[in-house]
Image (cartoon, grey):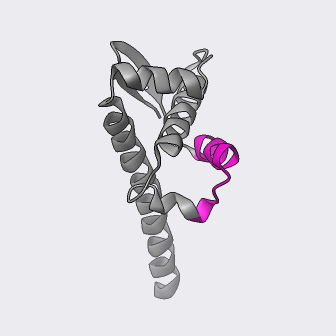
Amino acid sequence: MYEVVIINGKDYPVRFGMNALRMFCKDTGRSLADLDKLGKEISLDDACYLILNGIRDGSRVSGQECSLNVYDVADLLDEDFEAINKVLNVFSNQFNAKFEKEGNDKATKKVAKAKK
């Protein structure tokens, strides 16, 4: 699943699955444990890499080519700075939904096991 975000008048597919998060960690040297801190404190450099990897993964899943690099993302943000908030909202929604669902699935399994 991906969402389309309009940046500077152009549609970009955005997805924050495990592949996007893996690429973000690789690009920035962050660990998986650091990801929950991104909503509270994020540098501009981290924001550009997060957006880039969300677009790359969204493009991959939607079957589109993505030739953007981090400099291209920064240039896009020069033209549409509000795009940071748009993409970070997608990140927040997808990240929270993923972990809430997994938490609910685990809780359901524990309850089911306890009843047996």
Residue sitting at 33 percent across and 29 percent down?
81
Residue 2 location, quadrant: top left
- Evaluate whether residue 16 shows in this view: no
On whether residue 24 falls in the magenta region, the answer is yes
Name which residue lies at 45% across and 74% down. 107
Q: Is 89 on the left or on the right of 37, as rendered?
A: left
Where does residue 110 sit, x and y in percent of width and height? 50, 79
The front one of 82 and 23 is: 82
Q: Position of residue 55 (x, y in %)?
A: 52, 28
The x, y position of residue 88, in whole percent, is 38, 42
Considering every residue shown, the one lying at the far left of the view is 82
- Which one is in front, 62 or 36? 36
Magenta: predominant secondary structure element? helix
**Is residue 73 in view?**
yes
Return the residue nearer the eye: 5 or 46: 46
Q: Using the image as rendered, state which of residue 102 and residue 67 is in the foreground.
A: 67
* In the depicted structure, whether residue 10 falls above or below residue 13: above
Does the segment drawn in magenta span residue 28?
yes
Q: Which residues are magenta?
A: 18-33
Residue at 39% x, 23% y is: 78
Q: Tally the numbered discs.
A: 0
Apparent side of residue 50 relative to residue 84 in the rendered image (left or right): right
The residue positioned 46% from the left and 54% from the top of the image is: 98
